[in-house]
Image (cartoon, rainbow, N blue to C red):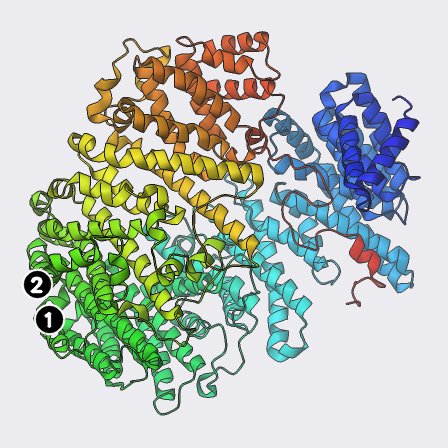
Amino acid sequence: MDDCSGTATTVAQAIAAALDWSSPPDARKAAVDYLESVKSGDIRTLASTSLILVRRNWPSEIRLHGFKLLQHLVRFRWDEFNITERREFANLTINIVSEVVNPHEEWALKSQTAALVAEVVRREGVALWRELLPTLVSLSIKGPIEAELVAMVLRWLPEDITVHNEDLEGDRRRVLLRGLTESLTEILPLLYTLLEKHFGAALSEFAGQQLDAAKQHASTVIASLNAVNAYAEWAPVPDLAKYGLIHGCGSLLQYNEFRLHACEFFKFICQRKRPTDATAVEFDSAMTMIFQILMNMSREFLSRSRANFTAIDETEFEFVECICECMVTLASSNMQCITGDGTTTTQFLQQMLEYYQHVKFGLHFQALLFWLAIMREPLSKAKGGGQIGRDNSAVGNSGVCSRPTEKEKKGVSAFINDDICAAILDISFQRMLKKNPSATNISTSKAFELWDDEFDSRTDFSQYRSRLLELIRLVAVQKPLVAATRVSERINLILKSYVHASVSAQDVALIESMQLGLETVVVAIFDGSAEFLSSAAESKFQLCTIFEAMLQQFLSLCWTEPALAVILGKYLDAMGPFLKYYPDSVASVVNKLFELLTSLPFVIKDPSFNNARHARLQICTSFIRIAKAAERSLLPHMKGIADTMAYLQGEGHLLRGEHNLLGEAFLIMASSAGIQQQQEVLAWLLEPLSKQWTQSEWQNAFLSDPAGLTRLCSDPQLMWSIYHTVTFFEKALKRSGIKKSVLNLQGSSAVTDVSTQPHPMSSHLSWMLPPLLRLIRSIHSLWSQPITQTLTSEIRAAKAMNHVEQASLLGESNKLFKGLFTSADGPQSDTMREGESSENDIRNWLKGIRDSGYNVIGLSATTGDTFFRCIDSHSVALALVENVQSMEFRHLRQLIHLVIIPMVKFCNPNLWEVWLENILHPLLLHCHQALACSWSSLLLDGRAKVPDTFGNLSGLELKVEVMEEKLLRDLTREVCSLLSVLASPPLNSGLPSLEHLGPTNRVDSLKELNAFVPNSMVGFLMMHKGLALHALKIGIDVFAWTDGEAVTKAIPFCGAIILLAIMTNSVELREFVAKDLFLALVKGLTLESNAVTSSDILGLCREIYVYLADRDPAPRQVLLSLPSSTRDDLLAFEDALAKTSSPKEQKQLFKSLLLLATGNKLRALAALKSTNIITNVTGRSRSSTSTSGPNIEEDDTIGLAAIT
């Protein structure tokens, strides 16, 4: 290598300048640019300069950068060396090891040295490795520093092979892996020797008070453990046992300094699957040894924990948590290794039960994952699944055993008895709270360490509790009597504790948590499963007795406090599935719910009664839940419920919101009886509404001129009456129709009859929709500029986004939902500043009308021809898009999602011309203009321009910018979803697939574009230039908008356009696809945001080139215009393309050409590569303790046998 001392000095100065944050920005930028020029400059100068910079006479930061330069050279420019130069460079690299053999050398530099040696071996291959291995063995004998470096090299080699890396081609990876595998007979004994030798030396040196020497030996032990961990992921398990590594790592579990590193070894090896070859017996033997090691550690810990829990510190808990995690993984993957020994299996299950019952939450949580997997096993077997299911967090599927024993066939579930299940249920019921209940008379002997939001950043309490409920469900399915008994006893204990005592907020949380447990058990037992239906009569009788007793206990409660009344209502509706099979108590439950409802005060405007109003609404929702669960059991009681509703309404003791909820429950009941019953119920519920809704007086007074809504907002009673009418229309549409369960009961012969019947709401659409469309049109007009100027200050303020919507955009948890219920029946009267209450009411009303109104129109469209033929398309277009240019992005997204997309999906092709053109043209025109403007602002100025108003957010400009960008991306994705629907197969049945063309890649006869119009929505769009122009512009612009999700949604549309261009003789469409779309696709690959869809984008590029390049010169022109493109490259590409008809191979050829023609500038393709540049941290996540060095050097003592 050349002498480049002067260059090295200049590079060192540039590194220092680049790292000096006190330097002027221009100086640092110039330094970075210079360093980049060196990296891309002459390779021999780069090599010589970098080798100089890693010498010991330079500061650490310069040397570290020198190593990065060398790693860049080896990884990306190795092929520029000739064979002689490669070998010379490899030798020089190995010689660098002597530069860092120093007791005071920084750990980072040693790590970088080892990583560089490993990288060279990776690039140069097996031959160099075979030469290097004896040298490494000899080097490791010299001393602990050399041995540590050898261990680091051994660690890096398999790390970069097992971690997927596209830079390392498959064949070369396999060759290198084979070379390492063949060397395992030397590597594994070497690692065991390093562990044994330096662990013993560390103990000896410490005993002699030679602490520095002891630390160095300890560093070597940790480096060796890290290396062993890298091999634990892939080396044959029998070999790891044969050469003593399982035994050695098990021995190190006893020592504080090494135990977490050793535990990592078991964490990796426990995930290994049982082989199917002749080594299976040896594998089982090794895994059985691991079971014993882990169980011995657990036995010791659990014994000490029971004897003196307070003597155990947090570091020990952390370690045992790791042990427990290993046991969970091992059992989930290889339980077959111990199920043959009943005693061992019983002991193992007992330990896992103790972990589940443990005070420490971390241990309980790990055991929860185990019991979930174990309890899923019988169900997965019943469904033909594997041995043990898999929880997403930590457990895996078991291997397949050859010739299993009878116990293995039955699985570990054979060892799970009623006592274990009862204990699991007891703990699960107690742990469904974040905090301990204050009542001491039902607390456990130890205060549980319950869920803490700091426990796991990847999950939250609701996810944890859902796992608990899942475990309760699994136990209840398999042990229904045990589950019924335990939940009954727990509820009985809780309810007795609070019969006479005052109830705090924490107590309410405890009572409420058991309602979830009860609901889970009841659903698991009475969900109509074959297990319950086929169970013995005696079991059914016992279950009925237990649940009937619980139900009677609930019915006897006289809770009138709003919070307790809500919980009681939930307890009653949790019994819904039980009532489905035992309907005798339905009347008592219905009466009790009405009793609860009428026991709560009926006050509208007094804010002190907001809790009571909320409770009344919640009790009404209990009717809905019971109607869903009990199904036909409620049918005999419909008249009684209707009479009670009529009585309460007549007495003025039933609010409109409450009436709507009860009406919704009625619709659910009717859906169990069929179409005729639904029609009768709808007529009964809707007839009173139709008389008020269709009156022309209120429409003319409030919907005929811009000032009408202002007058309407000054009449709260009418305003909220309209709101409830619209929301009930929404509920009626959602709840009407035929339930699958009814079809099943009626039999297959009824399906045809049902499908020919009109939708139950069909006869009501003609009077429902016209006033609603006028109302929606009036609300839309409030945002138009001329009318905005005439609005009152309250209405102008009410148009701004509320706090809940803002929190949703920011991804923040928000508790500002109070008032959503209270606003349902009238204005709020919370103590606010003057004028704010009315503003909030108007805001809630506008949002509610828009949400429900859009839903009503969209749901009505799903009825098909009934909707499109019962109302004038012009009035719909006026209501929806007359003021589309004034709409805020959040409202426009809603309109597209809830209204436009259903209309497009369900509109008959014969009506496309009449309906869709007048709606889609102004919509797509505005969407393209608005999105193009906002994206241009975001990409050029860093801030999206959106029309949405946020109210007064002074001082929160950053949050406003985040919300603006979120609104822009949400609308972009929704518009692209619309394009995707337009291109969906059901709407384009006339478009054939490219596969029908065969291997010739040619279309024999091109059709006229209008031939596709009758049965292709995309063909219809292309025949209408106004529609086509803006849809196509959005389709190509989205590839430059740095939103991968939007691109994913737009790709089907682009695919349909390409297909249409291939199949038709439309010159304009072909030119657009061959030039504009093709160029947009290629440019889209330059954005890293399109990495996820890069394969689909390449597929579209391939289709354009393969099918259109012979008919249009544009694709070739686009490729030749790329910065590094040459005609020779293009000719070679076309020659290779002609030799294969495989779309996959053609796409790969296209990818290679684009990378070559752009000089590897396509970030979407580069982002897919897991380059895994070597740093001081491995590419695969390990525990925080998997790196050594700094921790050891900073401590005064090392933690061996007698040291903490």
- Image quarter where the N terminus lies is top right
From the image, tell me which residue sits under label 1.
642
In percent of the image, x 17 and y 79: which residue is there?
591
In percent of the image, x 61 and y 60: which residue is there?
322
Instruction: Please give the label number shown on residue 763.
Output: none
Q: Quadrant of residue 661?
A: bottom left
Amino acid at circle 1: Ala
In the figure, 637 relative to 214: above or below? Answer: below
Q: Is residue 630 visible?
A: no
Q: Quadrant of residue 189?
A: top right
Q: Position of residue 989 (x, y in %)?
A: 23, 27
Q: Position of residue 164 (x, y in %)?
A: 59, 35
Label 2: which secondary element: helix
Q: Are marks 1 and 2 in contact (CB under 8 Å)?
A: yes
Q: Is residue 900 visible?
A: yes
From the image, tell me which residue sits under label 2.
684
Amino acid at circle 2: Trp
